[in-house]
Image: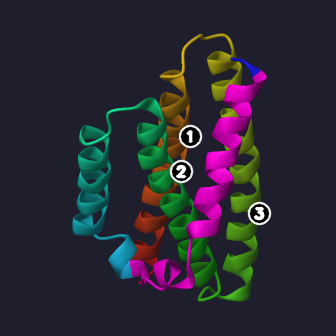
Amino acid sequence: MSISLRWLCVGLLAVGMLRWTSAEAASSPQDICSDTHRWRQDQQTQRCLADSPTTASMLKCVNDEYVQLDAELTGLYSDWVHTLPHGQRRVFQAAQREWVRYRDAQFLAIDALHDQLDGTMYLPVRVMQRSSVLKGRLLDLCDLVRISN
């Protein structure tokens, strides 16, 4: 991938991060973990992609989903871990630090694969694969939240 395309991808991710507001983070763990919320979010992204005639607009759709997932994951973990007794909290904080290392390694692997591919269409695919990593962790945390309540 050319350097200008890489910077376009990074720039769009940064813009999406700036668009995140505290109102989006205000959802409760029960809301974030509900099947209805996940379905609604998936449907919203699918509708956005269906209405996107260009790669840039597709990239915006998947980037918006990524930013929302990242905010929800961060908020859910932060809200939940502080409800745990001290001993459990330390264990889960250590587990989350390890997951962050795993996530970063996965992102490097995704980037290594996509850096070898030509074509702008791979930019949204890259972001979608990164979102998939976040979705997996979000589902895992939702299971832990349900068990602990």
Q: Do the residues labelled 3 and 2 touch (CB within 8 Å)?
A: no
Q: Residue 94 carries which label?
A: 3
At 66% across and 34% down in the image, what residue appears?
A: 106
Tag count: 3
- The answer to whether residue 87 is left or right of residue 148 is right
- The residue beneath circle 1 is 130
The answer to whether residue 35 is magenta is no
The type of residue carrying mark 2 is Leu
Query: x%, y% of residue 49?
Result: 31, 41
Query: Which is more N-terminal, label 3 or label 1?
Result: 3
Q: Residue 134 carries which label?
A: 2
The magenta span reads 3-29
Q: Between marks 1 and 3, how big is the CA–CA gap?
A: 22 Å
Q: Is residue 106 shown to the viewer in this render?
A: yes
At 42% across and 41% down in the image, what residue appears?
A: 57
Badge 1 local density, few (<14 within 10 Å), some, or many (20+)?
Answer: many
Point out the image quarter for the N terminus: top right
Q: Nearer the viewer, residue 55 or 102?
A: 55
At 44% across and 31% down in the image, what residue appears?
A: 55
Query: x%, y% of residue 50?
Result: 24, 39
Discs 3/2, front:
2
The type of residue carrying mark 3 is Ala
Discs 1/3, front:
1
Could you say whether the residue bearing mark 2 is in a helix, strand or loop?
Answer: helix
